Image (spheres, helix red, strand yellow):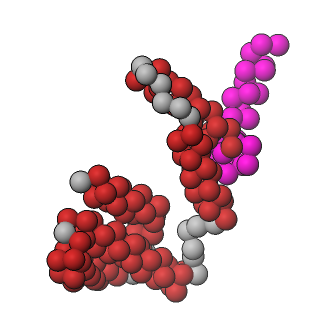
């Protein structure tokens, strides 16, 4: 069951990353494309389940969902590129993925503590400080940097 949760989790993360595509299409004059793409998703899911479940069991169903969702989202992204010349991703998205994977990997290197609460505190602090620090230092999000700069300015004015 662990692999199923892991695979479906990746599928959901992928869907969240691409989620803006569907909203853009729905709010445009091409809103009908959403219906067609959902029909394609349903058919693709049924076919992939039929092909993968006999070979991989419950993991096959998870893989079928992952493949279907990825292809569904790539279809919507291709439609956005074709009709609006719009790609909702940038180099900063790849950098954020690299930061996330790196921080996760480094977190795995921290020795496990006997007390669960201590382990949670150490890991949470490490991940939060490193992840947020890298996001701010590398200026991944203009909004976060702007908010932080405004906060620092207000704090400095207050303490002068």
Q: Residue furthest right?
A: 160
Residue located 47% across and 20% down the image? 118
Counting from the top left corner in percent of width and height, residue 136 is at: 69, 42
Residue 49 visible in the snapshot: no
Residue located 65% across and 58% down the image? 95
Region of the chain picked out in magenta, as a range? 135-160
Residue 152 visible in the snapshot: yes
Magenta stretch: includes residue 141: yes
**Up/down of 64 relative to 100, above or below:** below
To which quarter of the image does residue 156 belong? top right
Q: Residue furthest bottom?
A: 82
Q: Residue furthest top?
A: 159
Counting from the top left corner in percent of width and height, residue 146 is at: 70, 41
Residue located 67% across and 65% down the image? 91
To which quarter of the image does residue 153 belong? top right
Residue located 56% across and 28% down the image? 125
Seen from the viewer's position, the closer of residues 78 and 48 is 48
Counting from the top left corner in percent of width and height, residue 81 is at: 54, 81
Magenta stretch: includes residue 6: no
Q: Quadrant of the N terminus?
A: bottom left
Q: Quadrant of the C terminus?
A: top right
**Up/down of 116 relative to 55, above or below:** above
Q: Is residue 91 left or right of residue 1?
A: right
**Up/down of 54 relative to 89, above or below:** below
Q: Is residue 29 left or right of residue 141?
A: left
Q: Is residue 133 left or right of residue 48?
A: right
**Up/down of 111 relative to 116, above or below:** below
């Amino acid at each position: 069951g662990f692999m199923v949760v892991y695979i479906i989790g990746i599928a959901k993360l992928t869907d969240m990353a691409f989620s803006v595509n569907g909203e853009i299409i729905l709010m445009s004059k091409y809103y009908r494309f959403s219906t067609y793409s959902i029909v394609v998703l349903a058919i693709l899911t049924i076919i992939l389940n039929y092909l993968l479940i006999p070979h991989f069991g419950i993991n096959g169903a998870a893989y079928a969902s992952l493949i279907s969702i990825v292809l569904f989202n790539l279809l919507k992204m291709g439609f956005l590129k074709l009709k609006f010349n719009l790609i909702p991703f940038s180099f900063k998205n790849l950098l954020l993925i690299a930061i996330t994977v790196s921080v996760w990997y480094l977190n795995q290197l921290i020795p496990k503590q006997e007390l669960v609460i201590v382990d949670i505190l150490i890991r949470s602090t490490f991940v939060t400080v490193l992840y947020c620090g890298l996001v701010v230092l590398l200026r991944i999000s203009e909004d976060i940097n702007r908010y932080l700069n405004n906060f620092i300015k207000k704090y400095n004015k207050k303490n002068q």
